[in-house]
Amino acid sequence: MKLAARRCLVHPDREAAARCPSCHQYYCRECVVEHDTRFLCAACLQKSIEAGTSRRSMDFDWLSPLRLLLGFAAAYLSLYVIERILLLIPVNLYNGTWF
Amino acid sequence: MIDLLEEAIHLLRRTSAIMYAYYILGVTPFALLFFQLLADASYHRYLAEHLSNSVIRLALGYCWMKGFQALACQRLLASYSGEPVSRRRPLELLRLWSAQCAIQPWGILIKPMAFIALVPSPFVDAFFQNTSIVITGNRGDFMRCIKLSTSKIGSGLILNGIIFTFHIVMFACVYSTLATLPFLCKTLFGVETLLTHNFQWLVSVPFLLGTGFVSYFIIDLLLKSFYVIRLRRIECETSGKDLVYRLAELGYAIEAGKN
């Protein structure tokens, strides 16, 4: 049967405009969304995003320890500079003995 | 701006206790380490001796604090937007923590420099505050953060002015409270301490730094609340997400009314 002869699953009064490649149901233009060069229905899109997120979250990101190290080095450097600046303050000003 | 301030305070009132727990859990170790450094270095000649050890401890404390602050901001954003908070897995937490650690420490030096240069200050402040809220280690977070920080820079300038005034007022309040405490103890209970013998400690650098530190963290949570609301408003201007959630809430309310 031709696509135009099909009806949208959600809106039966509308002509189908696409077939979801995941659930193989027919939908109108309003009910499908382009995702990764494919037209998916809302439910399959949600599933696809959730699957992608959980897959990503399960993967170990090898850059994470590197970022942690870089961050620690940056914090060390910044705080070292600040403490060095404190050392530049004259003693009587630092201790308040000028007062 | 006044309505934003009211809304920020209201958000802090209605947010969950978990947000405060995250924030306190993050800030407390860093604050203790900082006060330990101030105590060790209360005399100029001791500062150089404690320098390398204290810097390592403080750097670790800073990274720890920024991770927890990011988690607190996520909670704050969730309670403002009404969106549910997803439970993070350990690897997601590691990614969030590492992303925060990679960016936030640069703010220690860049923020004061931007403040002195004055012009880039609203962008820099907005960037580092937005980093706490937006960056979770996912792809595209960094560009999103830059985009959010550069939008509405004019209102950011006014916001910075208000926050700076708050900092000054809070500094004066904390300073006067801490300065009068030893003398109050002496007057009321007759407790004599080293602090009541002279006034030099009132203008010493460690005391001023400690006061500045306390006043900064009193305002910081309000500032984070400000930026959460600002970020949400900017994003919702184009996405309309806030309306979608309000409609969903209305839908639930109607359903509950029917039942």
Image: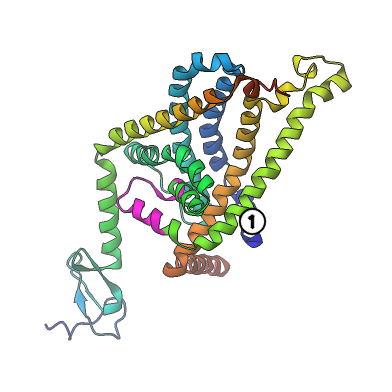
Q: Which residue is at a point 62% across and 23% down the rendered structure image?
A: A94
Q: Is residue B82 visible?
A: no
Q: Position of residue A85 (x, y in %)?
A: 51, 28
Instruction: Judge left or right: residue B96 versus residue B50.
Output: left
Is B158 one of the magenta-colored residues?
A: no
- Residue pointed to by mark 1: B5
Out of B208 and B76, give the one closest to the viewer: B208
Q: Which residue is at a point 50% across and 16% down the rendered structure image?
A: B48
Residue A92 in which image quadrant: top right
Instruction: Judge left or right: residue B81 versus residue B167.
Output: left
For residue B119, above or below residue A44: above
Q: Secondary structure at mark 1?
A: helix
Q: Main secondary structure of the magenta part?
A: helix
Residue B98 in which image quadrant: top left
Residue B21 in which image quadrant: top right
Q: Amino acid at mark 1?
A: Leu
Split into 4 quadrants, where in the image is the C terminus of chain B? bottom right
Magenta residues (range) = B132-147
Q: Position of residue B234 (x, y in %)?
A: 48, 63
Is B143 one of the magenta-colored residues?
A: yes
For residue A7, above or below residue B39: below
Split into 4 quadrants, where in the image is the N terminus of chain B? bottom right
Q: Position of residue A88 (x, y in %)?
A: 53, 25
Q: Position of residue B56 (x, y in %)?
A: 43, 22
Q: Which residue is at a point 78% across and 18% down the rendered structure image?
A: B198
For residue B241, above or below residue B157: below
Instruction: Judge left or right: residue B109 versus residue B162.
Output: left
Q: Which residue is at a point 25% across and 52% down the rendered structure image?
A: A52
Kindly identify which chain the residue marked by label 1 belongs to: B
